[in-house]
Image: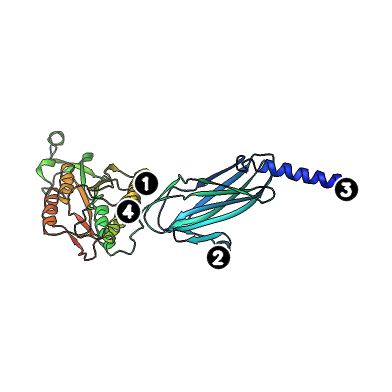
Amino acid sequence: MLGFIFIGLIFAAILFETLSLRDPLRKVSVSYNLDMLMAEPGEQITVSYQITNTGKLPVLYLGLSFSFDKGVTICEDQKWLDKHLTRSFTGISVDNSFFIMPHRCVRGRFHISLEKRGIYRLGRCYLEAGDILGLKSTVTTIEGKKKIVCTAALAENDPEIEVLGGFLGDISVRRFIMEDPSLLVGYKEYTGVEPMKKISWIQSAKTGKLMVKQNDFTLDTDVAIAVNLERNNASPMDLERCLELTRTACEKLEEMKIPYAFISNGDLRDLQQGFGRGHLSEILRNIGQSAPTCYKSFDSLIDKCIAGNRNNRSYILITPYLDDQDKKALARLQSVSDHEVCVLYGGKNRIKEVAV
C-alpha cells in the first residue's frame, strides 16, 4: 500500500513539474503605476505595482526587480533598504520575491525621488519564476515606458529673488494706480488739474459747468518672461540657475494671479499670455525637458519681444549674463517698454541691475 502511495506521489510530482516547466510566466502579469508624471528634485513619487497569477497552479517562487538609472533615490527606511535594495555601477534595483496562489494577486509600493532636473524613465522590470522543484527558472524583461519629468528647483535663496520681489511689488502697485480709459464710473467738476482731453463737452453742456470723465482703475496687467539660453561663456551651472529663476518667476506670478506670456530663444518654447495650473504645468514640463539648447541669438530674442510688444507690458528678462553688445540690444527693448525691464542674472559674476 505504501508503495502505491509513494509511486503516486512521485507521479504527481513529475506531473506538476512538467506542467510548471511549460512557461511558468505565461499566466503571470505585472502592472505598475506612478502617482505623478512630473515632479521637482527631492519630491517623493509613489511606485505602485500589482502581480497577478491567472493560472491554475501556484507560483512557488516569483522574483520581481525594478532597475533605475543613477539619479533616482529610494525613499524608504534603512531596514527596508537593507532587504530590498541592490546597488551596482549602472544604478540601483529594488528586489522582491513572492509566493502566489492560483487566481490571486499581490500588490506593493515603494517611494522614489529624483536628484536633479531632467527626464527619467522607469527602468527595466525583471520577472523571474521557478518550477515546482526549483530546478529551473524563467526570466522575462519588461521595458519601462513611463516617463517622469523632473522640473527645476525653486531658487528661493537666490539673491536675484530680491530684485524680482521688488519688481513684482511695483507691478502690484501699478495694478491699482493706472486709470483705464475704457472704464468710466462717472463725471466730476473740472478743477484745472485734469488734462483737457478728459473734459466731456456733452456733460459740460448739460450742467453748464466744465465736467471731466472719472475713470476706474484697471486691474489688468501685462507681463512677459523672456529667457535667454545663449551659451557663449555661460557654464552649464549658469544655465541651470537660469531655469531655476524661470520657474520661480512663474510661480510668483501665479501666486499674484497675474497673467504672463513666455518667450525664449531656446527649447523652452513660447506661450501666449495666460495663467493657471495648466499654463504653469506646460512651462514646468518644458523646463524639465530642456537640454538646455539655444536656437537663436539674444538679438533675435529681443526682436521677438519688440515685435510682440503691447501697451503697458512689463518684461522680466532671465539671462546668464549680459555683455556690452547684449546691453545695446536690451536698450532697444527698454526704448519701447513703458516700464523698466527687470533683469535676473543666472551667471556666477552677476550684478543686480535694472536696465535703463
Q: Position of residue 211 (x, y in %)?
A: 15, 40
Instruction: Report the Cα–Cα distance between label 2 and label 1.
Output: 34 Å
For marks 2 and 1, give the one nearer the viewer. Answer: 2
Q: Quadrant of the C terminus?
A: bottom left
* Three-letter residue code for mark 3: Leu
Which residue is identified by label 2? 78
Identify the residue shown where x is 56% and y is 59%.
84
Q: Secondary structure at mark 2?
A: helix
Would you name the residue on which mark 4 appears?
247
Q: Earlier in the sequence, mark 2 or mark 1?
A: 2
Q: Residue at x 73, y 44 (%)?
A: 14
Q: Is residue 222 visible?
A: no
Q: Tell me which numbered mark, 2 or 4, is placed earlier along the sequence.
A: 2
Nearer-N-terminus badge (4/3): 3
Counting from the top left corner in percent of width and height, residue 222 is at 24, 46
Dot placed on the residue nearer the N-terminal end, 3 or 1: 3
State if disc 3 and disc 2 touch (CB < 8 Å): no
Callout 1 environment at 10 Å: few (<14), some (14 to 19), or many (20+)? some
What's the CA distance linking mark 2 and mark 3? 52 Å
Front position among marks 2 and 3: 3
> On the image, numbered disc 3 is attached to which residue?
2
Label placed on residue 281:
1
